[in-house]
Amino acid sequence: MPNDALIVSILNLMGDSISSLPDEILGKLLSLVPTKVAASTSVLSKRWRNLLSLVDSLSFDESMVVYPNEEEATKGSQRFCDFVDKTLALLHNSPAIKTFSLCRVAKTMSYNDESARLNRHTQWGLFRYGATFGGGGGGTVVEHASIKRLVIATHVPHHIDYYLLLEYFENACQTVRFQAPSLVYLDYSSFVFRKYDVGDLDSLVEARLSLKLWRSTSHYDYDDDYYYDYNGSLCDDDDPSPPIFGDVTCLVAAIRNITTLHLSPDSLEVFHFCCKSMPIFNNLLNLSIESNNQNGWQVMPLLLKSCPNLQTLVFKGLVHKVTNRCGDACACNPQNPSLKNSKKMKKKKKICCLQTCPVKVLEISDYGGCFQEVEQMRHFLGNLKCLETVKVGVDPDNKGKNAEFLLANLMNLPKLSSKCTIQLL
């Protein structure tokens, strides 16, 4: 029995205990289940037949669609879009809608432009907006003065070849457009687009960015000779492969007034390779960064220098990929014989970006105590002069070392700030 029919049967079995409740309460109950289930309930149950218009939350998830065969599931089906269209047409005048979530996971590249439909429905004045696109290249358009919370996730299958993606982007819409002056919270997960057209986001308080490049940048790890072409794409004279795609300069500039920023490991590299100029984040108080050994910290010095009032710095993991552009935010000392100006670089002594960083609270999670992590902690403690509190959470998968041992190692590291205290989470 399908899940929606099962839920309807349960509701019917409960009889008057629920059916006797006011319509407004029943509408709230329908809002708690996926919209497909809510719609089926309204169709299959007499008592619930006219209550769909009372739901305040719409959640469309393609995984709820049952495809007739594997071939249709692989190619994608119009059934999901038809269901979304019919439901939204039925509820287009509903004043109750506050939450709208659309999840579509397509298995093939498609030029379907879903942005027009989403743009139309944002005119309801939604407070939260969510979308997951399978193709990733159709662009996203969000325009409305009253949207408060915006959540967008764009997924592209990892098995698709970059050259196919590049050709795809040449034929698809390449611009993401945000016009939401009342936006307070932005959660944006996507591969980078060629262009971002972002309006006034002065009301934005918190942003969570998970941006991803379309191709690996490993061949740039020890290369000082790359540049931006006339399209704003990163190039290398000796590199026959396509340039790095995307430009997030406008997007980054638009969020400059936020107080809290969360960045994924890939976002750090996107900021480095696809942001032509870094704005000053005068209001930024909390910066949270995820890190792994697949992505570098090239942008970290510039980012920290651009946050003159930063109070709390949070890292989920300290291990990162070492490149010749790590800078002085980390303790890395990359050795590469191909560096032409390594001797000159050693002679130049600059003030470490950490010494001008006003951070008072440093929080580390997933700490494992490996050599690179210990050296990074030594670098932080020895250069952050305003540091007052260090909170360290031990990696739960690290069973070879106990927390007390790791804490003892950290306590023995020299500290520039006399006010600094270290505690385990």
Image (tube, grey):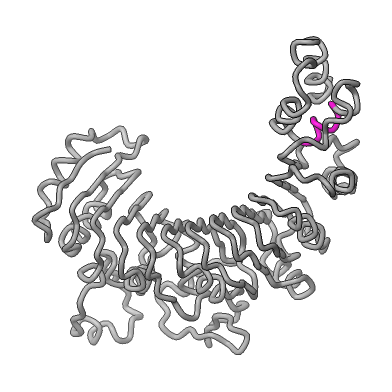
Query: Measured from the top left, where is residue 331 in percent x and y?
Result: 25, 64
- The quarter of the picture where residue 417 lies is bottom left
Query: Measured from the top left, where is residue 378 in percent x and y?
Result: 18, 57
Q: Is residue 155 above or below residue 348?
A: above
Q: Is residue 57 above or below residue 183?
A: above
Which residue does the image show at 46% across and 70% down from the upper left?
256
- The quarter of the picture where residue 320 lies is bottom left
Which residue does the image show at 46% across and 75% down from the upper left?
220
- Note whether residue 64 is visible: no
In this rendering, would 223 be left or right of 254? left
Secondary structure, magenta segment, majority class: helix
Q: For the magenta stretch, what is the residue range?
A: 35-41
Which residue occupies the foreground of this view, 24 or 383? 24
The quarter of the image holding the C terminus is: top left
Query: Measured from the top left, where is residue 135 in percent x and y?
Result: 74, 58
Which residue occupies the foreground of this view, 221 or 56? 56
Which residue does the image show at 75% across and 11% down from the upper left?
17
Q: Is residue 240 above or below residue 156?
A: below
- The quarter of the picture where residue 181 lies is bottom right
- Note whether residue 394 is visible: yes
Q: Is residue 36 magenta?
A: yes
The quarter of the image holding the N terminus is: top right
Q: Is residue 294 magenta?
A: no
Which residue does the image show at 31% across and 48% down from the upper left?
364
Q: How many marks?
A: 0
Query: Measured from the top left, where is residue 62 in percent x and y?
Result: 78, 42
